[in-house]
Image: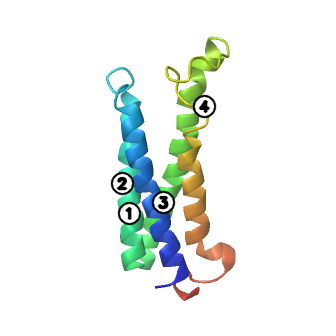
Amino acid sequence: MTRNRLLCGAVAAGYLFLAVDTLIEHHLVWAKHRPAFIPPTAATVLGVILLATCLVWSPALRKVARGALWLSLVIGLLGLYFHNVERFTKGFSWGKPSLTPPILAPLGFAGQGMVGLILLWERVRGVDPADSA
């Protein structure tokens, strides 16, 4: 198994851990904020896609994974907006940590997405990920 396949598996595991974390943190607010179901669902789907990519390592599946990773970047940036929109529209306040959404937590999606894209982006490095050691 090549280094890139192992790293892809590590990124997949990161998404699955992120799914558990967001499920724990978001389940209490699902009734009030409908978009709160997006992060745990998306992290689970991304983890499964990347795990399948790691195991099969076909060009078509790597292309699907790259599309999903771009979506992860979008989810992270939208999450950053939704977590902080009330802070800036109603006046900035740190608030009580247990009652307000974390300020930068959604960037976990963006960070995971960037790592995955660097890992799977073939044209940037000029080599096929399947050939790398």
Give 46 or 20, whichever is nearer the viewer.
Answer: 20
Residue that numbered label 3 is attached to: 67
Q: Amino acid at mark 3?
A: Gly
Label 1, secondary structure: give it. helix
- Do tag 2 and tag 1 residues touch (Cβ < 8 Å)? yes
Q: Height in image: 25 above or below 31?
A: below
Determine the CA span between mark 1 and mark 3.
10 Å
The residue carrying pointer 1 sits among few (fewer than 14), some (14 to 19) or many (20 or more) residues within 10 Å by Cα, namely some
Instruction: Point out the tag, 1 or 3, that comes first from the N-terminus.
Output: 1
- Of the numbered discs 3 and 4, the one sitting upstream in the chain is 3
Mark 2 vs 3, N-terminal side: 2
Taking 108 as reference, is 53 above or below it? below
The CA span between labels 4 and 2 is: 24 Å
Q: Amino acid at mark 4?
A: Ile
Instruction: Tell me if mark 4 has few (under 14), some (14-19) or many (20+) residues whose alpha carbon lies within 10 angstroms of its own.
Output: some
- Return the residue at label 1: 49
The residue sitting at 64% across, 20% down in the picture is: 94
Tag nearer the camera, 4 or 1: 4
Q: Disc 2 versus disc 3: distance between alpha carbons?
A: 12 Å
* Residue under label 4: 103
**x and y percentages locating residue 41 in the rendered image:** 35, 45
Of the numbered discs 4 and 2, the one sitting upstream in the chain is 2
Amino acid, disc 1:
Ile
Q: Which residue is mark 2?
A: 45
Residue 38, quarter of picture? top left
